[in-house]
Image: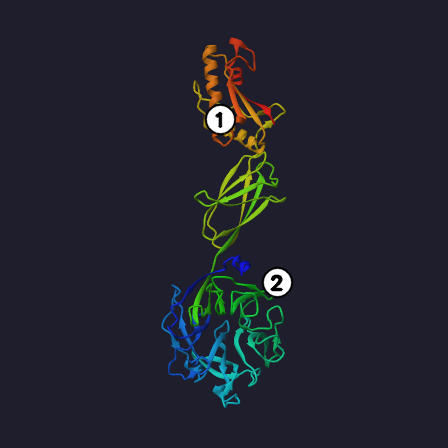
Amino acid sequence: IPSLLNTTNLFNVSETNINVKDESDFGAFLTNDKELYFVSTRNTSNKKDRWNDQHYLDIFKTIRKSDGTFEEVNLVKELNTPFHDGPVTISSDGNTIFFARDGLSEGKYEVSKNKTKIGQQGLYKAIKVDGKWEQIEALPVNSINYSVTCPSLSKDGKTLYFSSNMPGGLGESDIWKIAIEPNGYGKPENLGAKINTSDRENFPFITEDNVLYFASSGRQGYGAYDIFKINLSTAESAINLGKPVNSEKDDFSFSFNKLQDVGYFSSNRSGLDVIYTVLPICKANSLITVNDKKSGKMIANALVTISDTNGNILSSAATNADGKVSFDLQCNTEYLLKISASNYEDKTATISKIEKGGVPTTVSLDPLEVIITDTEVILNNVYFDFNKSNITSQGASELDKLVKVMKDNPKMVIFVKSHTDSKGSAAYNLKLSEQRAQSTVQYIISKGIESERISGKGFGNTEPKIACGTDCTEEQHSQNRRSEFTIVKK
């Protein structure tokens, strides 16, 4: 059970407006024309089945509306008998139906020792003529000795899946299939131990992409019948659909219409069999590729952090050797990305809302224009406005590079030396350079660098880069106005 609780939710579940109080409803099947067929005990004119003291099942249908609710329910009179009828499966073109029916309706039954007539479920086929089901015929697989029920037809109409306790199975009831041939039917084929167990497997449903959903009481589950799925085209194992589809009660009769992107199943978790709607939880995937903006080279080990629009970090991972990393996302949700890598400037990006599937995103990082020697970190000039010491946007951009270098080298300690040109008095220049040095230090600390790792001092015009005195050109003055970032400790 703990391992099942970790199963990722695949569907959202809600009760339909079909269900009737105190009656059993199940076997919902939605056609491509939005007709929903199902079976129910709501026909109170029927006799009661002594096994469960409920009325015999009949086949009903309704129309699914655009808001997911259903129109008035009607009895499919031409398919029903005084005994059990249904559930059904219908071809993709809507013109052929296979359905289960109690053998008692045709006088096919055995008599028990206490004189009780015991009819077995069998499968029947009908064709739609002028909107009605006609030409009903029994399938040759039927028998008075075992049950054949719960049909499901493949998209191409060439294979019929069903449940049966016929001889040759692995348990009390198994999932089987039979080929539908131009002139009849093939031999029943058991689907084997990948699906069937020594207990009960029932209610198969095959999707158009060859995924089989079925109910089983013989596999690890929450209790009673649980619904499983298996891709028949691969070698994978059957997986439990988990909650909220499965519960501690009987969960069964799963079907899905891919065209309408909606499915149905039944459960007796509320006491009687009730039909529920399932809507797939939309999942998307974003493949992030990180490269060098100048060379185009892929960047390995770049840290990609994904956040919601409020800035809450949801996940982070490093790119692989090909510069790629992927994240599973919710559909129709916007995300923020932050990408950082050694020797590159950090970058942010946005992942727009994805409706479904995967969307690739390429992020190009600017190489960090920083030279690191044994003694100093060399940036482009950090400019200040004339006669001011506050950090400009250009200065901040350069100092951010130093912040990144220090974060990438957590033991590095820096001493900031701030210099001025020789204009103005020596005392004024010394004061201004000290203010600029301390503004620089405070900016670095504000970006998350520990105060013990950064310090600074102003040197005025006492250490000119170019000793030109009062004869300096404007270009020479510019080179003398500088900040130097000496490495005290690496």
> In the rendered picture of this protein, how many numbered marks are placed on residues?
2
Q: Is residue 387 above or below residue 171?
A: above
Q: Is residue 31 left or right of residue 292?
A: left
Vertical placement of residue 225 versus 51, above or below: above
Instruction: Please tell me in which quadrant of the rendered image residue 363 appears.
Output: top right
Residue lying farthest to the top in this orientation: 470
User: Do labels 1 and 2 touch, CB within 8 Å?
Assistant: no
Dot 2 alpha-carbon crowd within 10 angstroms: few under 14, some 14 to 19, many 20 or more: few
Sequence-earlier tag: 1 or 2: 2
Which image quadrant is residue 35 in? bottom left
- Indicate the colouring scheme: rainbow
Examine the rendered structure and indicate whether residue 38 appears above or below residue 367. Answer: below
Q: In the depicted view, which residue is nearer to us: 296 or 149?
A: 149
Residue drawn at (60%, 66%) of the image: 232
Label 2 sits on residue:
236
Assign a secondary structure to mark 1: helix
The residue pinned by badge 1 equals 395
Task: Tell me how far mark 1 sits from mark 2, CA to CA.
Answer: 58 Å
The percent position of residue 97, horizontal first and vertical second, equals: 49, 77
Residue 235 percent across, percent down from the top left: 63, 63
Residue 431 pos. (x, y %): 46, 15
Q: Amino acid at mark 1?
A: Gly
What amino acid does circle 2 point to?
Glu
Number of other residues with Cα within 10 Å of mark 1, as a class: few under 14, some 14 to 19, many 20 or more: some
Element under disc 2: loop
Which quarter of the rendered picture does the C terminus lie within? top right
Given this view, does label 1 or label 2 mark the residue nearer the observer?
A: 2
At which x and y percent is residue 449? Answer: 51, 30
Residue placed at 57% from the left, 67% from the top?
219
**Tag of residue 369:** none
